[in-house]
Image (cartoon, grey):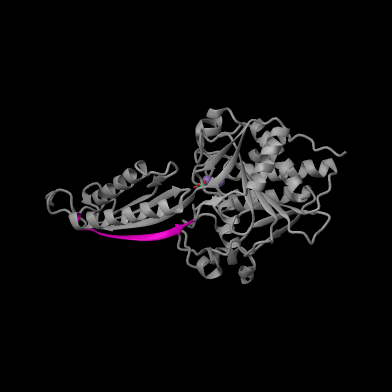
Amino acid sequence: MQQLGKANSANIETWLETINTYNSTPEFGTTRVLFTEPEVGARNYVKGEMKKLGMTIHEDAIGNIFGVYPGTDATLPPVWTGSHIDTVLNAGMFDGMSGVVAGLEAVRLIRESGISLRRSLVVVVYTSEEPTRFKLGCLGSRALAGKLDAAEAATLHDAAGKSLYEVLEQLGFPVQDFDLVKKKPGDVFAAVELHIDQTGVLERAGKTVGIVKTICAPTVLEVEVIGRQSHAGGTSMEERRDAYMAACELALVLENLGRHSDSEYTTVTVGKVEVIPNAVNVIPGKVVFSVDIRDCDYDKKNELVMKFRQAVSKVESERGVAVTIKMVNNDHPMGCSPKITQLIEKNCCQQDVPYMYTISGAFHDSMLVGDFAPVAMIFVPSHDGISHSPQEWTDFDDLAAGTDVLTGTLVALANA
Ligand code: HGY
Ligand code: MN
Ligand code: MN
């Protein structure tokens, strides 16, 4: 009986360390923004590693990379694994990359074992899971789910005013085939993503694997506050229409709504603030700030947005400012497939890997892939719960153990 070997943590470390060299901020963490030189370099490196593993490679119109390890029956819908390799600004080296590397290691183990798979196994590198360049996350998986088409890609602009569509076209992606990106239910048999926990839950519980039950979803707003720019010394406190103070009041309203939500998974973040003209002795006339609201209960998330809108009207009338709210995205939480989570649990038990069920406060590509395929996620511990930071860390042995559970699960699905 052919046996799967054990994942090699040194292998995983080498892959992650090498991907990490494709970085535009080596002086402070890792920054690999969609379709910038480091990210294109990392894409090419990963494709090279896929080829070494005997995989054939396909890329779609939005730049999703599919590394295919062939099964014996090409007519059967494949099994997917994978994640993203783009990052937030000054990130760590594990968020996303862990899932891509675990997929490569799973293929290496299966190939070396001689075990044949009925269904092909596809390692996917999803385009731009992070909203860093175009303010919207999960661009590749969103297009796969049919929630981002060519016309919408032309309306997403980066800070330089370039649209996603233009960038794709300039890089030579087949934008004319954008409509072919979308997958329909049945096209993919199952999709399992390994990812770091990005909280301290697993580490505090002493568990090596987290089996995700539900993936929380974001509602992202862009809030513009227009007041009246005027002199810091010449304008009395009564006659001011200070856009920044109004924005601060709204931010505290949001924090209060988040803290007093009756859903334990509600989070509210104001992460990005633009103050205009941003001068020491000028009362800001305009402020634009981001709002990132998460929950695994869609209705509760919408209820919080509605309460925020009510608070906006109050601040407008009391402060004499004008506020506009642009909804960037309002995603649905995604439940993971119990069929697959039970398979993951079975592999944890067979391999004697300590595990627990958990919820993902972070969003992931699986949140959208779940629109057309049954999904599940395997978390591995983040040290001190730190992520989206240069201090992000996951032990390579934990990554190897998570990869062994992933590999066992993928083989079972591919031969189901
Ligand atoms: O923001 C998120 O939840 C993900 O890490 N991009
Ligand atoms: Mn992230
Ligand atoms: Mn991620």
- Point out residue 147 in the picture as x, y percentages from the top left corner: 54, 63
The front one of 182 and 189 is 189
Q: Residue at x 64, y 32 (%)?
A: 398
Q: Confirm whether residue 27 shows in the render.
A: no
Quadrant of res 207: top right
Q: Residue at x 67, y 56 (%)?
A: 65
* Magenta run includes residue 325: yes
* Magenta run includes residue 340: no
The front one of 404 and 84 is 404
Magenta part of the protein: which range? Answer: 319-331
- Point out residue 104 in the picture as x, y percentages from the top left corner: 72, 45
**Magenta span main SS:** strand
Please give the count of numbered marks on the rendered protein.
Answer: 0
Q: Is residue 401 above or below residue 341?
A: above
Quadrant of res 109: top right
| Quarter the N terminus occupies | top right
Q: Residue at x 71, y 43 (%)?
A: 409
- Point out residue 369 in the picture as x, y percentages from the top left corner: 60, 55
- Point out residue 146 in the picture as x, y percentages from the top left corner: 57, 64
Q: Is 287 displayed left or right of 350 in the figure?
A: left
Q: Confirm whether residue 345 shows in the render.
A: yes
Spot the residue most to the right: 1
